[in-house]
Amino acid sequence: MAWKNYPGAVLATLLVTHILAQIDRNILLGFSSTVVAELGISNAQYGLLVGAVWVLSYAVMAIVMGACADRFSRTRVIAAGLVVWSVCTAASGSTHSFGQLVAARLLVATGEAALVPAAVGILAEVFSARRRATALGLFFIGIPLGVGSSFVLAGTVGAVYGWRATFHGLGVIGAVMAVALAFLKDEREQHAAAARSTPFAAQLREVLCVMRGSPALQLAITGFVLVHLIFAGLSFAQLWLVRERGLDPAGITRLIGGAQILFGTLGAVVGGAGGDRFARRFAGGHASFMALLVAVCAPLMIAYRFAPAGSPLFYAGMCAGAFLPLAVYGPAISVIQSHVPTRMRSTITGLTMTLINLFAFALGNFAAGALSDRLAKAGVHAPLTWVLLGTDLFAIASLPCFLALARHARSRAAPGDTAPERACVGASQQQAQN
């Protein structure tokens, strides 16, 4: 089936898979207060569970799966990952201790690490550079739709059937989808054969060489990682609003879910399509657009932590926090893809996902949980408020990175395949031949 001749079908297939992946990844957040109480775990343990535990698997496997996607069938790589994460999502619903849940979530992360690197590689091949940020932005709608749906499912289906049955049902749905996805062929261009002939270690050295030789790539990845600190705040959003703002758990879960779906989706669409349009008309390209997004959203995000619950400023800040990270996805990944050779697109995406999960999710979530526990023991009023303000400020620190990236783009007539990148590729190919 020549499904790649129909870009819309390619995008729709990958988007549906991405939505399910994000639901399975984030469904635990929607049940945080219930699971924490039932399993008797602390804030620090919960932070480990949604952060470092996930990264122990995902951060390692993302770059491995990215390299595999550059070498072999990307659709089958995705299908294999989907089987693993679906089976282990179902297994998560049968756990009765912190240790058991840790083991199940480790394997969920292992499977999900296959999706984004392979999917980005497919989309970068199917869509031209002029439309790439738009396509990537639409693909990453899967994040707000998945995150939001996980909260909505927890507040509706989970409220009726419980968290365990919800996990079991999601596992069955994913296993069925994996079978269908495995039958889609992934015809590759000539660069795939060249990638298969390159030893795995040499392939990774080539990626690192390209990164060292490209300041623009370093700035793009650094800014992209920092923006993800917003998600560390999201991990504790329900606990913060219930404990320190006195809101109803089920009601606030549905509110967070709705905001993620509506404004996260809006962010992905605006960021992708708007970034492509902005890049064609203004100096600094996608980077200037990302800097503008951060500058507009930053004051609202800070005000959100202190505004009265239910006030217009409170809702505006919640929506800005849902909007910003997804708005950056399309233009950021488009910039990253433009600074690497075609043969390493999935590998560099996997490395980027590794850095995001290591610094933003693992360290960010654990630090937020541990610091909030320490502040609470010290008698600090509203400890989560101050900790989550800190995660917002780290995310806003992406602004200088995007401004520097914009200056770099304006100073170059043709950003993309630089001399250091070509040198890295040539050295890698010579090593493979030897």
Image (tube, grey):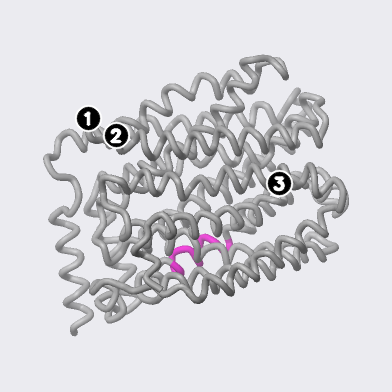
Q: Residue 263, percent across and down? A: 55, 32
Boundaries of the magenta span? 56-65
Read off the residue under disc 1: 281
* For the residues bearing labels 2 and 1, Cβ distance under 8 angstroms: yes
Position of 344 with respect to 102 (left or right) is left
Magenta span main SS: helix
In this rendering, the answer to whether 133 lies above or below 321 is below
Q: Residues within 10 Å of mark 2 (few under 14, many from 20)?
A: some
User: Of 131 and 216, which appears nearest the observer?
Assistant: 131
User: Of 91 and 17, which appears nearest the observer?
Assistant: 17
Give the residue drawn at x 47%, y 58%: 116
Of circles 3 and 1, the one toward us is 1
Read off the residue under disc 3: 29
Tally the numbered discs.
Answer: 3
Q: Residue 141, percent across and down? A: 51, 45
Tag 3 secondary structure: helix
Of circles 3 and 2, the one toward us is 2
User: Of 349 and 233, which appears nearest the observer?
Assistant: 349
Q: What's the amino acid at mark 2?
A: Arg
Q: Residue 377, percent across and down? A: 78, 34
Q: Is residue 164 magenta?
A: no
In this rendering, the answer to whether 299 lies above or below 421 is above
In this rendering, the answer to whether 334 lies above or below 259 is below
Alpha carbon of mark 3 to alpha carbon of mark 2: how far? 35 Å
Q: Residues within 10 Å of mark 1 (few under 14, many from 20)?
A: few
Read off the residue under disc 2: 277
Q: Residues within 10 Å of mark 3 (few under 14, many from 20)?
A: many
Q: Along the polypeptide, which appears first: circle 3 or circle 1?
A: 3
